[in-house]
Amino acid sequence: MFYKKKLFKAFLSFFAVVLCMCFFVPFGAYAETGNGLYLGGFPAGFVLSTTKVEVVGICEVLTAKGTCSPARDAGIQSGDVIVKINGEDVKKTSDVNEIIAREYKKYEIEILRDGERLTLPVTPVKDLASGGKRLGILVKDSINGIGTVTYIDKTNNKFASLGHPITDNGNQIITINGGTVYNSLIYDVKKGVRGTPGELRGAFESSVIGQAELNCQCGVYGTLAENFNCSNLVKVSKASLNDVNIGTAYIYSTVYGKEAEMYKISIVKVDRNNKDNRNFVIKVEDKRLIEKTGGIVQGMSGSPIVQDGRLVGAVTHVFVNDPTRGYGIGIDNMLNAY
């Protein structure tokens, strides 16, 4: 439910990624530092660097002999992930130009396509404008999108969000190499209907929430910005899955603007040992939220779930055939992941 959307002019366009290893710490640490836990529910804009370079477009190169596209001629397609060029690892976009600038007699590109590795011969050409070698491809090494912060751990200067991993089109967890998480503003919502999930539409602001460090099964985590202000947030204690009951609870989420609101839900099922972190089934009961969004929509993932005044988990997924229902992850799993 991490939502990808175009940014305002200050940011690059980003592309759809539908989207690990968790490092565990003893839960006992949180028994001592729980007084620094603050409730999230506010939107965040993610700009995350990845360790893979994806082809997002094929273009023409203007040469002294006219226009051509070496990449197209070689059979390279949008969606291909460039793994190596002439045996050298490619992990960021700048690697492509650096490698093809070298004087090789021939060039071979190893790509990953639909889970299969292919090696394609390609002949770079000299760009008339810049004088450099070009392949005629557009590539990216980052992902961008809108999601929701679950909690702020002020004691340890950490934040947690999403409640689920960002994955690629093959449903594999994307390894990130850092990134920045910005405050955001929700300006529109596409309502969810049976069979078609809705989505929040937001814009990034210039102020920073923190630096992303980990994308894992339990969400996206990072270090809080030094100047992040918690004065308007609600301090909260947490409850374990053993303390969660079937019945009334609340989610905190932002469906317009920047401030989270509280919406009534029901926890209709608790699955404490679910291997996919689908520890709750929840149902939206609040008519205000149903009227605004149809229920749970993309971009709401990470919205904290509170029962009896304590943080018990976060929203992660929506039921496609019933947008008023969805899954949630237990807060213990999120706290122990980073």
Image (cartoon, helix red, strand yellow):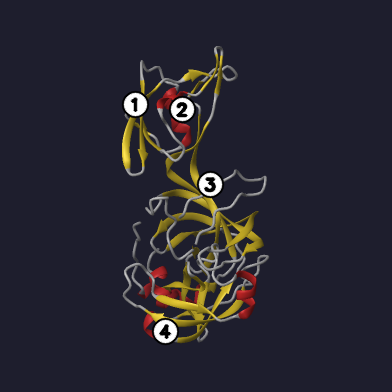
Please tell me which of labels 3 and 4 falls first in the chain: 3
Q: Quadrant of residue 82?
A: top left
Q: Nearer the viewer, residue 183 or 152?
A: 183
Q: Are marks 1 and 3 in contact (CB under 8 Å)?
A: no
Q: Give the mark toward the camera: 2 or 3.
A: 2
103 relative to 246, above or below: above
Measure how far apart labels 3 and 4 are at the Cα level: 38 Å
Quarter of the figure that contains the C terminus: bottom left
**Dot placed on the residue nearer the N-terminal end, 2 or 4:** 2
Give amino acid for label 2.
Answer: Arg
Tell me the mark number nearer the camera, choosing from 1 and 3: 3
In the rendered image, which residue does mark 4 sit on? 244
Residue 54 at what x, y percent from top left? 45, 40
Which one is nearer the viewer's eye here, 207 or 318?
A: 318
Residue 72 tag number: 2
Q: Is residue 153 visible?
A: no
Three-letter code for the amino acid on which mark 3 is drawn: Phe
Report crowding for label 4: few under 14, some 14 to 19, many 20 or more residues within 10 A (C-alpha).
many
Place of residue 64 in the rendered image (x, y in percent of width and height, measured from the top left): 56, 12
Q: CA distance from mark 1 to mark 4?
A: 55 Å
Looking at the image, is mark 2 or mark 3 earlier in the sequence?
A: 3
CA neighbours of label 3 inside 10 A, class few (<14), some (14 to 19), many (20+): some
Query: Compared to 106, does 168 lie above or below?
Result: below
Pointer 3 residue: 15
**Disc 1 residue type (three-letter):** Asn
Element type where label 2 sits in the image: helix
Alpha carbon separation for disc pair 2 and 4: 56 Å
